[in-house]
Amino acid sequence: MGASSVFSIRFNLPTKIVFERGAITKVGFEAEDLGKKALIVITRGGSMIKFGYLGNVRLSLESRGIKYVVYNNVSSNPRVDEVEKGVEVAEKEKCDFVVGLGGGSAIDTAKAIAATLGSGKPFIKYLRREKEISAAYPVIAIPTTHGTGSEVDKYAVVTDVERKAKLTVISRHIYPKVAILDPETTVTLPPQLTAATAFDALSHAFEAYINRSTNRLARVFAAESMKNIVENIEYAVKHGLNIAVRTRLLWASMLAGLAIDLVRTALCHAMEHPLSAFYPHVHHGLGLSILMPAWIKFTLESAKEDFAEIAKILGLKTEGLTIDQAAKAAYDFVADLRKKVGLNFKLRDLGVKAEDIDAMVENAFTYMKALIENNPRVPTKEELKKIYLESY
């Protein structure tokens, strides 16, 4: 990385970040200037209701005289039709801003709905890049997982079912106006989801650190993110109610979100999107955790200095090691960490069929080309197939 390119940075974060325990009770206060009626977007899993987070948001809005309607028709890999239905509800109910409450799925759907309300229907045109987003309704993002970082970035990932592709809309208009990060909302994540969402953030940090677009600021965010994840992930999986550990993981997830907002992700994400487009039941973070070791192994050769730096950031003993050995240590660490936190799966364990891999490779090269080319080492289709097979 030349010094000039690594210091070539454009950064503008229009999102107000409120990061503190109990922040979820302040939604009404933060929403006062944004509108009179909210569309609250949650996924259909029911955990936002069960754990009282939706109740907290509703009470807080009511305390400021703000009306709301809840839209819960969202799956864990949100689809175009779910966005379109949300837009209809918001129009019918005359909502003037959107609250995304939950994981990345709820927040991304909220952003997509807000963009369609502001720029005109249908949403699919923006997703397929046939039309530019020109405006969006205000969004408040309240993440209850420490995974996506969507609360601080300009991306929304939605599945185009017709094309069987997970696509990303990118627009400065969909940055949330306010991100409310309350560590107390993450304590209810079960152990496997705790590990999977933390791995989502970890792969954001890894990919941002080593990719071709990386810069000094993205690396500051990514390094702090990795450090916090590896120091806290194991403890969080075993002791989920520990608020100090949850705080660190939520902090790390937000920072990784800032890192990818600056420089995007790379090949690991380019491979996971086709995976969860073909198999919508696959959790994005879990998919990434399975693909990550094979991705690192493939990329190592072209980014060994970077991976050697990562080994140091992770707190591994690197004195006396060659650059190659230090880089390999980072790989070994990730492969080992997956096992320690209960994510020791292969693609076949998730029901992935070997005969779908060729189609997933094609899908990645069709829809994820920008991320593939953002990787330090760019694979051929044959090489990409090998990485999938190694994870199989």
Image (spheres, rainbow, N blue to C red):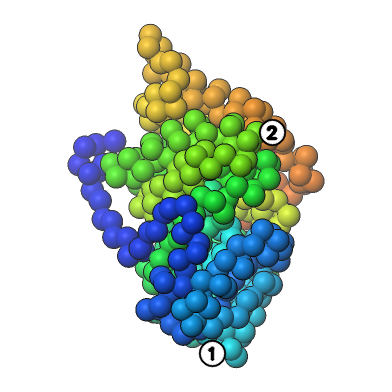
- Of the pair 370 and 358, the residue shown nearer to us: 370
Query: Left or right: 68 with respect to 45?
Result: left
**Vertical order, 60 against 48 (above or below):** below
**Vertical order, 64 against 216 (above or below):** below
**Vertical order, 369 against 118 (above or below):** above
Residue at the (57%, 39%) spot, across then down:
242
Residue 297's disc is: none
Per the image, the residue denoted by label 1 is 94
Q: Quadrant of the C terminus?
A: top right
Query: Left or right: 144 with respect to 301?
Result: right
Q: Quadrant of the N terminus?
A: top left
Which element carries disc 2, helix, strand or loop?
A: loop
Residue at the (41%, 43%) spot, across then down:
208
Tell me the quarter of the picture where residue 326 sits. Answer: top left
Q: Position of residue 186 (x, y in %)?
A: 57, 50
Packing grade of label 2 (10 A; few <14, some 14-19, many >=20) is some
Packing grade of label 1 (10 A; few <14, some 14-19, many >=20) is some
Q: Position of residue 241 (x, y in %)?
A: 61, 42
Q: How many marks?
A: 2
> Between marks 1 and 2, how big is the CA–CA gap?
45 Å
Tell me the quarter of the picture where residue 211 sits. Answer: top left
Q: Position of residue 84 (x, y in %)?
A: 61, 79
Residue at the (63%, 35%) spot, across then down:
239
Q: Amino acid at mark 2?
A: Gly
Q: In terms of sequence position, does the residue under pointer 1 or pointer 2 come before the other?
A: 1
Per the image, the residue denoted by label 2 is 342
Residue at the (78%, 39%) spot, across then down:
349
Q: Amino acid at mark 1?
A: Lys
